Amino acid sequence: MSTLIKLENVHKIYKLDEVEVPAINGIDLSINKGDFVVVMGPSGSGKSTAMNLVGCLDTPSKGEIYLEKQNIAHLEESDLAQIRGRKIGFIFQTFNLIPSLTALENVILPMTFQNIPRSGKLKKAREVLELVGLGDRISHLPSQLSGGEKQRVAIARALVNEPEIILADEPTGNLDTKTGDEIMKILKDLNKKGKTIILVTHNLDYIKLGSKVIKLKDGKVAG
């Protein structure tokens, strides 16, 4: 398999007033195309920071990050935004749906800056909502959906630009066990279709889903 993501001696230090707080402390790791990576670790271990760095939401204080052999560690925000829009889909614990928009409108949002006619956007958004089992809920507002349905909308939104990488940060954290397992089945099916999945979770039951497990502690990869 080809290497899709590579981190080399990556550090991330935040400054609070005059105090430096290291969140990531010299991480080296590689993720292959088609991997299902499970990232685990206690609170404060650097999981979300590592996710933000891989997802082009932040840049490292030191070190190199390669995405498909392109060094993204020192790019400007405008360039990172372009990469995020094309290559990466995000799924968050809190869904991050816009309350005033329908399921369909929420899914269309990532295509706003894509050069696609409105009819094409509508067609694509409907297709991915059908894929996650919400073809009959496209006109509903988030307030009219269950937690599991909201997360399915979020998954559809993450998929609509056909990214190669899906970053899922505690996607089942606000869901009951049964609904969480249904969401994980969707992610596993996407992985079988070739998507690279990076899952941050506290749930030990999900370790068995991963082709690779990365454990973080104190900002480092634990042995």
Image (cartoon, rainbow, N blue to C red):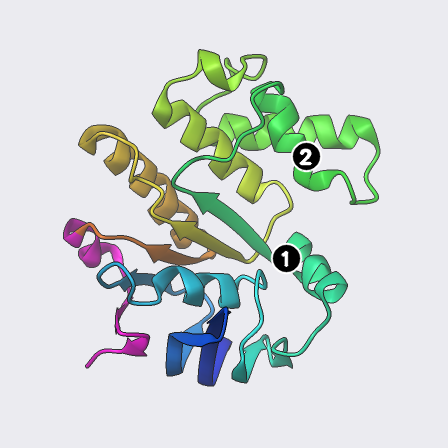
Q: Residues within 10 Å of mark 2 (few under 14, many from 20)?
A: some
State the residue at coordinates (79%, 26%).
Answer: 119
Q: Which mark is residue 195?
A: none
Whether pointer 2 and pointer 1 mark residues with C-beta atoms closer than 8 Å, the reply is no
Q: Secondary structure at mark 1?
A: helix
| Nearer to me, 85 or 50 | 50
State the residue at coordinates (29%, 67%).
Answer: 45
Q: Is residue 216 magenta?
A: yes
The single residue placed furthest to the front in the displayed view is 18
Vertically, is 58 above or below 159?
Answer: below
Q: Is residue 11 left or right of residue 116?
A: left
Image quadrant assignment for residue 211: bottom left
State the residue at coordinates (79%, 44%).
Answer: 113
Q: Which mark is residue 84?
A: 1
State the residue at coordinates (66%, 78%).
Answer: 74
Vertically, is 185 above or below 209?
Answer: above
Percent position of residue 170, x then y: 33, 47
Q: Earlier in the sequence, mark 2 or mark 1?
A: 1
**Can see residue 2?**
no
Amino acid type of the residue that numbered disc 1 sits on in the rendered structure: Arg
Amino acid type of the residue that numbered disc 2 sits on in the rendered structure: Leu
What range of the chain is rendered magenta?
A: 204-223
Q: Residues within 10 Å of mark 1 (few under 14, many from 20)?
A: some
- Quadrant of the frame with the N terminus: bottom left
* Residue identifier under label 2: 109
Vertically, is 103 above or below 75?
Answer: above
Q: Is residue 202 left or right of residue 130?
A: left
Percent position of residue 84, x then y: 63, 57
Q: Is residue 10 left or right of residue 205?
A: right
Vertically, is 29 above or below 139?
Answer: below
